[in-house]
Image (spheres, helix red, strand yellow):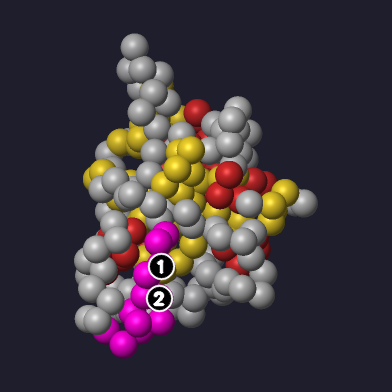
Amino acid sequence: MPELTVASDYCVNLDTGLIEPARLSLSPNRDKRPANVSPDMIVLHGISLPPGRYGGSEIEALFLNELDWDAHPYFGEIRGTEVSAHLLLRRDGELVQFVPFSERAWHAGKSWFRDRAHCNDFSIGIELEGDDDVPYDDRQYQVLPRVLHALMAVYPDITARQMAGHCDVSPGRKSDPGPAFDWLRLYDALGESFENNISCT
């Protein structure tokens, strides 16, 4: 029987590398992790497409290589980009999975974390729909700690100290999730989620 662990209402299946309940939309932008490497950190990102616009289909289209590059002037600046993340957390709280956790998503690019390069090799990338300077939505702060705790339950090397922003692992190159992201609020909520840990069968 697949091993499942839940934090509140989120379950991670180690056999499939998927989290429930998330809508699955598999990205082609993924590959194998290095041999004998399991995820041991989280990288949080912020994304909106076009910048500052929320709720559309463009982020998902980007991760699926289906974005209409001519639909907006900004898209011309990123034309041909092939990227992905394991998860996207929309502003309304919807969770979308693009890459199984057992595989490598293309989210961090050139990056370092505590003297280790190539964070994609050993991290889980979570995109938050948002902008560096616009407060993230309350619903994202409600869902994110439950998702993180579900991941921490099945990947024990991931702890609160093993979480970083894209800005931290790619300083000078990336700024997200930006000053608008409230890390203290996340840590407080993450602590509360530990109190609600139960088993899922």
Q: In the image, what residue occupies the spot 62% across and 61% down? A: 110
Read off the residue under disc 2.
78
Range of residues picked out in magenta: 72-83
Q: Residue at x 30, y 36 (%)?
A: 20
Instruction: Check the image and name the residue furthest to the right.
Output: 115
Residue type beneath disc 1: Thr
Position in image of residue 194 (x %, y %): 51, 36
80 or 176, which lies in front?
80
Tell me, yes or no, whether the two marked residues, 2 and 1, touch with CB atoms within 8 Å: yes
Residue 75 vertical position relative to residue 145 in the rendered view, above or below: below
> Who's the residue at 55% across and 54% down the image?
43
Furthest-front residue in view?
80
The amino acid at mark 2 is Ile
Residue situated furthest bottom in the rendering: 73
Decide: few, some or many residues near mark 1? Use Cα within 10 Å; few <14, some 14-19, many ≥20: few
Q: Quadrant of the N terminus?
A: top left
